[in-house]
Amino acid sequence: MLVFVVKWAASLIQIVGYGATAFGLTPWNLYFFVVGVLGWFVVGVLWKDRAIMLIHLVALAAMIAGMSNG
């Protein structure tokens, strides 16, 4: 049940991030994406799925690097 809630919450938050990007709501879009990516990383941990953990760690690192350069 916990995984179900986290993965759907993270997915919805990322969808809000896409919408925020479409409407030019910077930096809010990045904040939504960071929360969504962290949520999916947690899903990867709970599932013990290293591929999900890896891709979301890379995405998080890229976002943090981009945010610190902007």
Image: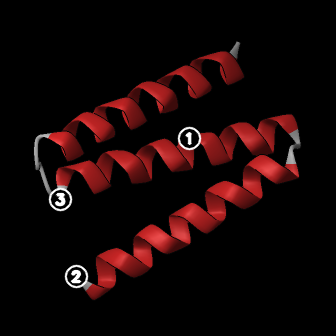
Point out residue 35 in the picture as x, y percentages from the top left corner: 42, 46
The residue drawn where x is 11% and y is 49% is 24
Q: Is residue 35 left or right of residue 1?
A: left
Q: Is residue 65 above or below residue 32?
A: below
Residue carrying label 3: 27
- 10 Å crowding of disc 1: few (<14), some (14-19), many (20+): many
Residue at the spot 82% in from the left edge and 51% down from the top edge: 51
Q: Earlier in the sequence, mark 1 or mark 3?
A: 3
The location of residue 66, given as percent across then percent down, is: 36, 77
Which residue type does callout 2 highlight? Gly
Answer with left or right where residue 1 lies relative to residue 22. Answer: right
Q: Secondary structure at mark 1?
A: helix
How much space separates mark 1 and mark 3, taking CA atoms? 19 Å
Residue pictured at 42% horizontal, 25% vertical:
12
Q: Which residue in the protein does label 1 denote? A: 39
- Mark 1: amino acid: Gly
First-in-chain label (3 vs 2) = 3
Residue at mark 3 to residue at mark 2: CA–CA distance: 10 Å
Q: CA distance from mark 1 to mark 2?
A: 24 Å
N-term-proximal mark, 1 vs 2: 1
Furthest toward the left, the residue is 24
Dividing the picture into quarters, in which one does residue 23 lie? top left
Q: Secondary structure at mark 3?
A: loop
| Residue identified by numbered label 2 | 70
